[in-house]
Image (spheres, rainbow, N blue to C red):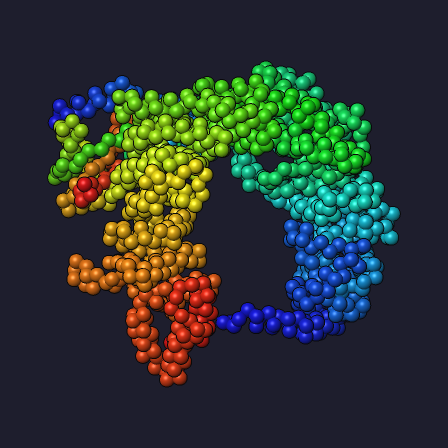
Amino acid sequence: MSDEEHHFESKADAGASKTYPQQAGTIRKNGYIVIKGRPCKVVEVSTSKTGKHGHAKCHFVGIDIFTAKKLEDIVPSSHNCDVPHVNRTDYQLIDISEDGFVSLLTENGSTKDDLRLPTDDSLLTQIKDGFAEGKDLVVSVMSAMGEEQINALKDIGPKN
Amino acid sequence: MGLPREFHEQCRRLLERDFLKTFYQWTSEAASSVTNRIIESDSFVPEVKVCTAALDLMLQILNWDFRSNTSDTKVNVNVFSSGVRQDVDSLKRYECHLVQPGSDWRDVLILSGHIGWLLSLYAALRPKFSCEGYWLDCPIAVSARKLIVQFSSLTGTVFLSDDGKMHERHLLQLLSGILEWVDPPDVVSKAIENGKSESEMLDGCRTFLAIANVTTPYVFDGLLKSIRPIGTLTFLSILMSEVIKVLITSNTEEETWSWEARDILLDTWTALLMPINTITVNTLLPPEGIKAAANLFGFIVECELRMASASAFNDEGDSDYLRASVSAMDERLSSYALIARASIDVTIPLLTSVFSERVTRLNQGRGIIDLTETLEELYSLLLIIGHVIADEGEGEMPLVPNAIQTQFVVNSVEADKHPVILLSSSIIKFAEQCLNPEMRASVFSPRLMESIVWFLARWSSTYLMSSDGIVEKILDSGHHYEYSSKKALLSFFGEHNQGRIVLDIIVRISLITLTSYPGEKDLQGLTCYMLLHSLVQQKHICVHLVALNSWHDLATAFSIEKTLFLLDTAHQRSLAQTLVRSASGVRNSEESSQYVRNLMGHIATYIVEMSSKSDFKNIAQQPDILLSVSCMLERLRGAASASEPRTQKAIYELGFSVMNPILVLLEVYKHESAVVYLLLKFVVDWVDGQITYLEAQETTAVVDFCMRLLQLYSSHNIGKISLSLSSSLLSEAQTDKYKDLRALLQLLSSLCSKDMIDFSSDSIETQGTNISQVVYFGLHIVTPLISMDLLKYPKLCHDYFSLLSHLLEVYPETFAQLNSEAFTHILGTLDFGLHHQDVDVVSKCLRSLQALASYHYKETGNGNIGLGAHAMGLKDSSGEVQEGLLSRFLRSLLQLLFFEDYSSDLISVAADALLPLILCEQSLYQRLGNELIERQTNPNLKSRLANALHSLTSANQLSSSLDRINYQRFRKNLNSFLVEVRGFLKTV
């Protein structure tokens, strides 16, 4: 298991930084942004001016993609913001262990066992119920800035 | 309640004719009987309450929407039009209620001295306001004033048709009564500032508005002349100047009385000056009035500028408020423009000099002092000038405003001395200076640029290279005098004169706003959507555009330079659309295709290369890649939506070259809903623009592509559940899904249209593509994704059902071939739609049912199987017998018609659906009918129901064929059936 963890770390850093600079004016609703060190999905952008004849600035409202906390930020629109590199990977769900971890099948055939189940009850039940019913589940894992979380699941059982 | 509308109409007519006047008389007698007591007593007496109530009732009665005489007034229009305006339609805007009781009311309202009584009552009340029990806003005073205002709106046949003399006398009486409320303006306004209530002032203004609405400016102006040395217009101008003065000195955030008074007075001016756009000023206004308007406008400009400079430094928080009041401001500016146009030969030179003075101040103060105030002044000034010299097109080509066309007489040799040309040229010259980087940094703030771009857009759609053909025509027609001003103007900025130079300047300014104002979305939005977009609307301007170097620079910057990738993606789409559209100005189709290829080629290449990179899957999620892919897709979409016959080939090739990459992208970005949506929208726009032109072979390729796209999309999304802690993110995900599906439905609809409109040379059948099957296949893929929850989005629901009803009407035969799962799903949605609240959706469902049932009926009649197994009852897995679809819907439709609430508009559509259903399922219908009759316990009603049911299917020689006449007959039958039985069916 420690082997696996190590493997993951190196993969996350491979050739890509965690965030990228991007002009504030180009960040749109539904895009991503780093606010106060947290990766967020932008749910609202509005622009205003610094003084009537000053330059535009953007007001972002973001929701932390992992904790669902609401965060806000104001940035001059010609300045750069950090944009997190948000990655999503699909894994097939192999097992749910007693202690709240899941076991996932990676593309190259090995397993990934370091991911916790969501703590939130309703999400948890959705995954557990689906698994208990014996469906073939694919979970998609969202990772950004060194954190990861299950963010969607898909039932591929009966169809294919 | 429950009675037909006609009955209510009759009641109202009866009430109006027989009782209203009597009521009114009684009330007014009651009121006058207590008047003396009120006037004589110094303190509050109980009679005041009686009188207040009476006044209120009179007001209510006069608010009645009088109908009886509307036809009379129309006949009398000519008689009255000399003095009294009848053009009610133009008044609707000001929400001013015209009181038009008929001539019956003349004795009560006019001849009885009723007005005099009311005015003297109020006059008697005024001195009492200091007494106990009375004050300016006490109920009786408020009611009396309201009634006075109401009387001012009196018009129509209640006055004798004596050239409006009687009406004038009436108005004069009122005017002299209310004059002391507002006169002298400065004293009154000072009193209000010192704490007096403003209601008299406001009601005075309202009276002016009411009078302005029922008179022509000449009569309006003349009213006051008989009692004062000045005309009413002059007085109005003085009054309004006073109000504005108070408004700017108080300068607070909340709406004060001066604010309201200003708006009422502006409406008054608008009411007076509205016809200026069709009639020449001289015939509309007396010279004195023109002068009054000129003075007022001068004062308005001064005050607006003062307000601008005062507000130059307050920002923050303000911005939301500003955005909310933009439309209010626009309305205000249009009223200002009307006032300015009333005295256009004074106001244009005034504006020119004020403008150049501010520009000089800028140039002198540059780099030395803070220019913010001047910048803000220029901002307001540009907005005002824009409104004065040009109208908004609202989608059409605006003409040169009438006042400007007619008021200046200029000799064509000295065209450059034309005041409007002078003004326009000085503004353009000023705007041009933003091309200089140094000037730009020190003077041209984003906000100033916004006003410049706005002005240029508005100005150019009226003046720049404007419809040269018309100028020629005018020349021919010999109306030299009348149109010489317009001709001079238009030819000065025409194609063969300064037009090209100005166009070049405009394009270069646009390029600067796009590249040198990073992150200024509003400014760039204005440039893309207003300025550039309107330029390419006209082909003859495109011809010049594509020949300009500056346009070429813009196109090059667009296709290769990095800076334009920083624009908002929606702006990039618009820019792509604009640039592609300008290809219509290129000489022949060969070259215009080449032009499009040059423009968009890089973008297609980028996408192709990107998607074929071996490590694309790994880098795709990087924000920088994500951004550039989104930009490219937006641009492609912009280009695709600009498809025209001429560039169609080039755009087809463009789309064709990225077909496979699109599928790769869809796979890679399946979790990135924003990109997926862009992809789908591009395909939708592209297919929509192309489908009608495509040849058979191309159609096959496109259709195959669409099917692969649909399959891929559906494989990603079926059974997918998004998990998130945040409810707002979850609802976002739901919304994204909705938008995607809506795009897919649009895609299917545009594929459908290929069968209807087809410009290609050969029929698509030759390649074996059957559109209906394709679309059904698509629907098959899409329907499982459409959940009942998603159908709650009104737009999606609408799109879905219109596609469905179209499909069922046109190709019922393929529907029968759908597998049972998809079939059940579609029926489920139909059932859902049938009980929807939206009438439109229900009628679409009914139409689908009609299509299905009539198809089945006709086919079975010809010995075919029709809907086959679907129509039969089935035994499902649990062994229960399921009804065939037709019986099921017959049942639910009858249930709906007999027992539920629905709009009466639906009855005829429902009849159309019911008839074939009944014909298909005769026995069930009989059974249901009998059940219905059996359930009825009251023997009387029972027989009525039986008779009604019988005549529903037999009256009017209804036969068992499905032709138009029969449908019509059945509609009638159903209608009378429902009238007969629905009342008791619903209640029992």
Does residue B948 appear to the left or right of B56 in the view shown?
Answer: left
Q: Tell me if residue B346 comes above or below residue B895 in the rendering.
A: above
Is residue B900 in view from this perspective?
Answer: no
Assign the C terminus of chain B to one quadrant of the image: bottom left
* Residue B2, image x, y percentages: 49, 71
Work out whether residue B790 can be spotted: yes
Q: Give the x, y percent position of residue A34.
A: 36, 28
* For residue B965, above or below residue A38: below
> Which residue corresponds to the image point at 29% horizontal and 70% vertical from the top-left?
B924
Give B7 or B260, whichever is nearer the viewer: B7
Q: Quadrant of residue B874?
A: bottom left
What residue sits 72% from the left and 43% below the top?
B277
In the foreground, A131 or B375: A131
Q: Position of residue B473 (x, y in %)?
A: 72, 35
Q: What percent of the width, then of the height, locates residue B824?
A: 27, 54
Q: Residue at x 78, y 51 (%)?
A: B216
A122 left or right of B770 in image? left
Nearer to us in this view, B813 or B332: B813
**Furthest residue to the bottom?**
B939
- Viewed as shown, does residue B525 lie left or right of B796? right
